[in-house]
Image (cartoon, rainbow, N blue to C red):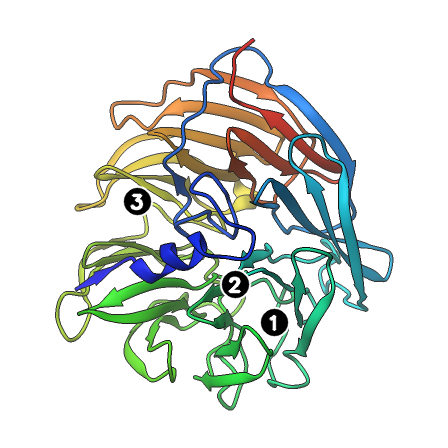
């Protein structure tokens, strides 16, 4: 049986900045699944903007913890970590490390990975593979680790994009590389390698925690497919191949875990699969390339349904609702366009790449927006929600909006 690792939530509650249930301290939020129990009141008009802070390049999303917001971005030849007070945008501290990363396709030279705040540290992974941990109080660098030089990892198509998972005193990474550099765990206090496994290339999906028959596990969606590794020594608990046949492809959406089941989705003709992991080996419950094939944005599960983007980003994806148990498409908003989404208190918050924010019930009967507003410019980064305040970025800056009230 697989279920979300209970240890994760206990560790976050005890982290150095006294993380709260309403925080968004990492990629995909407090539970690493794109959902939060908090609700928002915004249902009409434009949400009130609290502040704007200048920001550099990158696809890294903001994180929120202990009344502070964290953004990882690039200015000229520096990867910068900026920390502000969520309430007013006042800069608390800012620190930087040098980078010479150049995007092979000319998209963006900034960092891709979202910061992770846990146990009094903020952990970041730069586009060129510089992993570092800083003290949340003053930004002091605690350790650095070059995953290219020290772990033999490969930057792949688009640079390093895995958002670190920090639990149980370890930092887990989907790195990609030969000779055992595929997935890895480092000591969160020192940055020393605890283990490395597989020769898989990176899939760009960030790892998530799970529990298998009472044993903790970390799930990695590499370019080859799903790998379940024991957190202590990295030995493989099981694997499931799931990748496109074409070379120019990635697996970018993180796995979703519910009960004894794991959901995987990818584009490039790969499609989605729901795996029953209650036995010794995972077994497909259903698979379909026409249900919910996500290019880069991880879907969310609300009740017995999935909500997410279907199709390639550059081809105008659909927004869809799909039955978890069967893969049946309940509704589809065709040519909706790409974006990211989260679930908050049973409602969907959707931020399109155009910068339009939409709130709608997570209703399998149909898509019924309650409110929509143009809040930022063009963007592709994930956003965050903490205590009813939404943090998002575009190419010009970093913004906070109050969703606790409606105009």
Q: Are marks 1 and 3 in contact (CB under 8 Å)?
A: no
**4 over 246 or under it: above or below:** above
The answer to whether residue 200 is left or right of residue 75 is: left
Residue with the mark numbered 1: 156
Report x, y in % for residue 120: 58, 60
Dot 3: element: loop
Sequence order check, earlier mark of 1 and 2: 1
**261 over 91 or under it: above or below:** below
Report x, y in % for residue 308: 39, 40
Q: How many marks?
A: 3
Q: Nearer the viewer, residue 261 or 190?
A: 190
- Residue neighbourhood size for the residue with mark 1, other residues' Cα within 10 Å, grouped as few (<14), some (14–19), many (≥20): some
**Which circle, 1 or 2, is nearer the viewer?**
2
Report x, y in % for residue 333: 40, 28
The answer to whether residue 256 is left or right of residue 254 is: left
Report the Cα–Cα distance between label 3 and label 2.
Answer: 21 Å
Sequence order check, earlier mark of 3 and 2: 2
Q: Identify which residue is drawn at 53% across, 64% down.
A: 164
Q: Identify which residue is drawn at 63% across, 78% down.
A: 147
Task: Please indicate, yes or no, whether residue 220 appears anywhere in the rendered image.
Answer: yes
Residue with the mark numbered 3: 291
Residue with the mark numbered 2: 204
């Amino acid at each position: 049986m697989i279920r979300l690792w209970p240890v994760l939530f206990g560790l976050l509650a005890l982290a150095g900045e006294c993380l709260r249930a309403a925080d968004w301290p990492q990629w995909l939020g407090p539970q690493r699944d794109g959902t939060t129990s908090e609700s928002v009141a915004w249902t009409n008009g434009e949400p009130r903007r609290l502040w704007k802070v200048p920001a550099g390049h990158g696809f890294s999303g903001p994180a929120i913890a202990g009344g502070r917001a964290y953004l990882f971005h690039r200015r000229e030849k520096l990867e910068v970590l900026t920390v502000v007070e969520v309430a007013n945008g006042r800069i608390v501290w800012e620190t930087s490390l040098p980078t010479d990363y150049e995007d092979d396709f000319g998209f963006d030279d900034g960092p891709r990975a979202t910061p992770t705040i846990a146990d009094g540290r903020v952990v970041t992974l730069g586009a060129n593979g510089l992993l570092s941990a800083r003290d949340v109080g003053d930004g002091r660098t605690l350790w650095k680790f070059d995953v290219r030089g020290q772990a033999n990892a490969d930057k792949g198509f688009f640079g390093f994009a895995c958002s670190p998972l920090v639990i149980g005193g370890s930092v887990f990474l989907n790195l990609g590389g030969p000779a055992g550099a595929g997935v890895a765990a480092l000591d969160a206090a020192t940055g020393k390698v605890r283990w490395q496994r597989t020769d898989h290339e990176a899939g760009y999906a960030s790892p998530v925690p799970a529990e298998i028959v009472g044993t903790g596990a970390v799930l990695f969606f590499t370019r080859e497919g799903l790998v379940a590794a024991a957190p202590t020594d990295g030995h493989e608990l099981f694997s499931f191949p799931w990748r496109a046949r074409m070379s120019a492809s990635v697996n970018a959406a993180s796995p979703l875990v519910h009960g004894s089941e794991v959901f995987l989705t990818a584009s490039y003709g790969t499609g989605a699969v729901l795996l029953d992991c209650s036995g010794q080996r995972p077994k497909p419950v259903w698979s379909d390339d026409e249900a919910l094939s996500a290019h880069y944005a991880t879907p969310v599960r609300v009740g017995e349904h999935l909500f997410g983007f279907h199709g390639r980003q550059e081809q105008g994806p659909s927004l869809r609702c799909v039955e978890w148990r069967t893969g049946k498409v309940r509704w589809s908003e065709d040519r909706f366009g790409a974006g990211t989404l989260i679930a908050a208190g049973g409602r969907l918050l959707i931020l399109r790449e155009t910068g339009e924010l939409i709130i709608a019930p997570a209703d399998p009967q149909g898509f019924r927006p309650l409110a929509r507003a143009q809040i930022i410019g063009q963007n592709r980064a994930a956003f965050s929600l903490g205590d009813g305040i939404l943090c998002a970025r575009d190419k010009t800056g970093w913004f906070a909006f109050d969703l606790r009230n409606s105009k």
